Amino acid sequence: MAIGPVQLIVLGFPRPEFHGRIAAELERLHASGAVSVVDALALYKDPEGEIEITHLSTLSDEEAKEFGSTVGALIGLGIEGEAGIEPGAEAGARAAADGVTAFSDEEAWDVLEEIPNGSAAALVLLEHQWAIPLRDAIAEAGGFRISDGFISPLDLVAVGLLTADEARQQHALETATADAR
């Protein structure tokens, strides 16, 4: 099965107030062929750092069986919460024994550590379907990905794409907690 470039997006919510808008936007993007939600988890990290997990997904039953809990496997946490860490680590060890290595310990991204205690998070694994033809064209031309990442709105001021006021507003929307809004 060919799969497009995949991205894990971690969204924080100090006091989540979901009204269906995020799910609706993901559905719209899926319907347009731009992205597909491979997997999604919602979790709550209590003030002591204990984690409760809920599996979210727009996958069909058949797709859910195929992909399983991919986000949990990526971050070393099963759908059972912290009890899933050990099975996740074992699965990773089996993959490493088979010669599959994603990255070194120095390069590892500790997603769970970055989520503040006493808050909620949504972890959404997106397949960028729009990028498949571009990725294939780059590969056919002998090219390869060196790096990638989102650019802060504040950095766009220096190149003239945003005014300082626009950048501050966008940066605040992207990074501020609900208390700061």
Image (cartoon, rainbow, N blue to C red):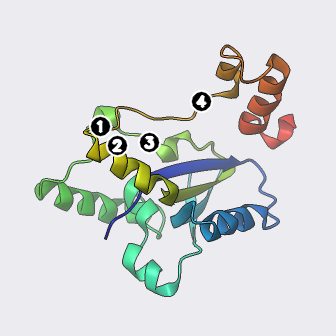
Which residue is rendered at x = 85% and y = 34% of the image? Answer: 180
Counting residues from the start of the chain, the first of labels 4 and 3 encountered is 3
Residue type marked 1: Gly
Q: Is residue 95 visible?
A: yes
Which residue is rendered at x = 63% and y = 71% of the image? Answer: 31
Location of mark 3 (residue): 110
Q: Which numbered mark, 4 or 3, is in the foreground of this view?
A: 4
Which residue is rendered at x = 78% and y = 37% of the image? Answer: 173
Instruction: Judge left or right: residue 79 versus residue 57.
Output: left
Mark 2–mark 1 CB contact (< 8 Å): yes
Q: Is residue 5 visible?
A: no
Residue type marked 3: Asp
Q: Which numbered mark, 3 or 2, is in the foreground of this view?
A: 2
| Secondary structure beneath label 2 | helix
Instruction: Judge left or right: residue 130 versus residue 135.
Output: right
| Secondary structure beneath label 3 | loop
Q: Position of residue 120 (x, y in %)?
A: 67, 54
Location of mark 2 (residue): 138
Q: CA distance from mark 3 to mark 2?
A: 30 Å
Residue type marked 4: Ile
Q: Residues within 10 Å of mark 3 (few under 14, many from 20)?
A: few
Residue type marked 2: Ile
> Which quadrant of the structure image shows residue 17?
bottom right
Picture layout, residue 166 above or below residue 15:
above
